[in-house]
Amino acid sequence: MEIAVLFKVVPDDQDIQVKADRTLDFSKAKPKVSEYDLNAIEEAAQLAAANPGSKVVAITVGPKSIDDSKLKKNVLARGVDELVMVADDSLDGLDAYATAAALAKAVESAGSFDVLLAGDGSADNYAQQVPVQLACVMGLPVVTAATKVDVDGAAATIERTLEDAVETVRVALPAVVAVTPDIALPRIPGMKDILAAGKKPAAITAEQAPVACATEVVSCLAPESADRKLVVLDAKADGAIDEFAAALKAAL
Amino acid sequence: MKALVIAESADAARELSAGARTMADEVVLATFGEAPEAVADKVAVIAVPEGAIVDDAADTLLALADAEGVGVVLVEPTRHLKTVAGKIAAAKGTSTITDVMSFADGAASALYFGGVAERALKPSTDFAVYTVGSGAFADAAASGANEAVSVDWVAPAKAVELVSVAPVQKSGVDLNKADVVVAAGRGFSEEAQLDMARELCDKIGGGLGCSRPLTEGVDWLPRETYIGVSGLMLSPKVYVSLGISGQMQHMVGANRSGMIFAVNKDKNAPIFKQCDYGLVGDIVDVLPALNAAL
Ligand SMILES: Cc1cc2nc3c(=O)[nH]c(=O)nc-3n(C[C@H](O)[C@H](O)[C@H](O)COP(=O)(O)OP(=O)(O)OC[C@H]3O[C@@H](n4cnc5c(N)ncnc54)[C@H](O)[C@@H]3O)c2cc1C
């Protein structure tokens, strides 16, 4: 079985700084795989393991900065066979419409796939729209919120966990499937995996014909932070727990 | 301009129809069951055929949008309808602006990086699709004659087949109503340790919630009790965080609390920059002592 897993590279939000004018400074934030896409990558690896002879190709599009050797090894060390990356500054800050257009081309250049897996939502936008738009561009069916995927022959049986129901659905392959973080816990790659990752095929290309976004960002500002007392006590210090308890009681 | 509202729940149907009224001259509501009374000019009840999923109503709704000459679509952000929104947006060459909290000057505001920032977004296309959370149009009033429009199901080119549906058992806990919320995070390394948090809840009359990791992979607390951007957005009088690092995706659901208390063993945890009272210590030592002191 040919499995594509789509992932997004985002700046590490722990290192996004808020400037005095409340705009964001990303200069210290290193690129990382968006958290819940790691679960999709793990599911891809597990599906491949359950279906011997399968291949997993991880695919992403984004600005030049995503072409980061540590990041590429990290992806390839997770049971992924090949990496396909379109890294071009014309692909920075795309909305779902433009991302799907770029991804569809990247997927088509990478081969033909039975299943295209995606994560639950990216850490930046969490819009949950790219898998749907990609399926539309490629003329494929899409299933979201997947918590279990079983492939048999030319179809998959998928369990999707919704707000108040669990649906079991059947979909003909190829199909796009967005999985929730529940589906598989990401592995922690070992030294051997990381070393082997360096030898796996990785195709890094530039975008030839970027598609424009359909939405524009008018402003992006950190919220005004609430005034907090910021009294931080060391629990080992004398009376600290009593002081904390008294403050808590007084607040009730 | 005409607006199309797509909603599964009656509350969202009412609120989004009221909001659509502030954006458009005419409001068409599409629902999947009975529509609330007098909320829209026209109402289409979509009958999803047996064996089809609600997500696949997109083609039917697209046909309705075209027939009515709709320019803006407001969608309730459920799992089903987020797919519908995405399919409509794709067909119209645009992107859905998701989880909108408010509209001002033609731009929609939504969280970015789980609350690290708020962005105002505008469609650059003539056709706009938004998913809108509850509260965005709390002040608007819905009105209309609810004239019935009949629509025929338009089957998608590649349908997904619904095999079965099982309801999810809910715990019945509603932290939205709690004045005091205690939240447990990954600082709890074993499920049994949660008893210390439960005891604290008893002492201070709090409801027990958690960070998202305690409901995923491990199943220690019900999914409907996790707090944050993708879960509950709370504003209790008192919020006590235990073994939670304080990442934005979580804090955005708690930072409107009256007072924030935090226990964490790492004095550099981000939570200590966002709390009123913090206690640096291991929950295993601190919670029994704290419970005894209360
Ligand atoms: C798109 C997206 C959406 C998300 N939505 C949500 C959401 O809605 N809600 C949510 O909660 N998260 C959400 N997350 C996840 C979020 O980014 C964090 O990963 C999560 O909130 C971390 O949970 P935590 O603080 O419990 O765990 P960690 O970040 O692992 O922190 C554990 C903390 O416990 C402390 N600790 C460890 N042991 C002890 C001990 N013995 N005693 C005291 N302290 C201890 C540690 O110092 C640490 O600070 C989302 C992520 C993404 C990418």
Image (cartoon, coloured by chain):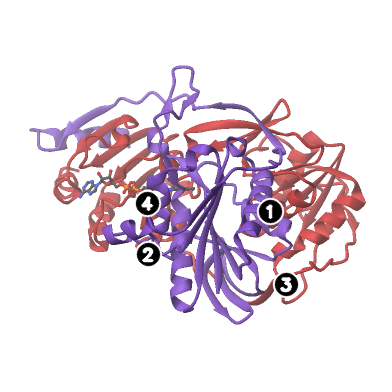
Please state the chain letter of the residue tagged with numbered disc 3 in the rendered image.
Answer: B
Are labels 2 and 3 on one chain?
yes
Residue type, mark 3 in image? Ala
Quadrant of the rendered structure where residue B266 is? top left
Label 2 packing within 10 angstroms: few (<14), some (14-19), many (20+)? few
Q: Looking at this view, name the residue that lies furthest to the left.
A: A238
Chain B, hue in figure: red
Q: Residue A174 location, x and y as percent?
A: 65, 70
Query: Which residue carries the number 1 mark?
Result: A133
Quadrant of the rendered structure where residue A118 is? bottom right
Query: Which residue carries the number 2 mark?
Result: B219
Q: Residue A94 location, x and y as percent?
A: 62, 40
Q: Is mark 4 within 8 Å of ligand 1?
A: yes
What numbered label is drawn on residue B52? 3
Is B232 situated above or below A157?
A: above
Looking at the rendered image, the disc whose residue lies closer to the viewer, 4 or 1, is 1
> Mark 4 and mark 3: span between their CA atoms?
35 Å
Q: Is residue B196 visible?
A: yes
What numbered label is drawn on residue B144? none
> Mark 4 and mark 1: span between their CA atoms?
33 Å
Q: Which one of the lettered chains is coloured purple?
A: A
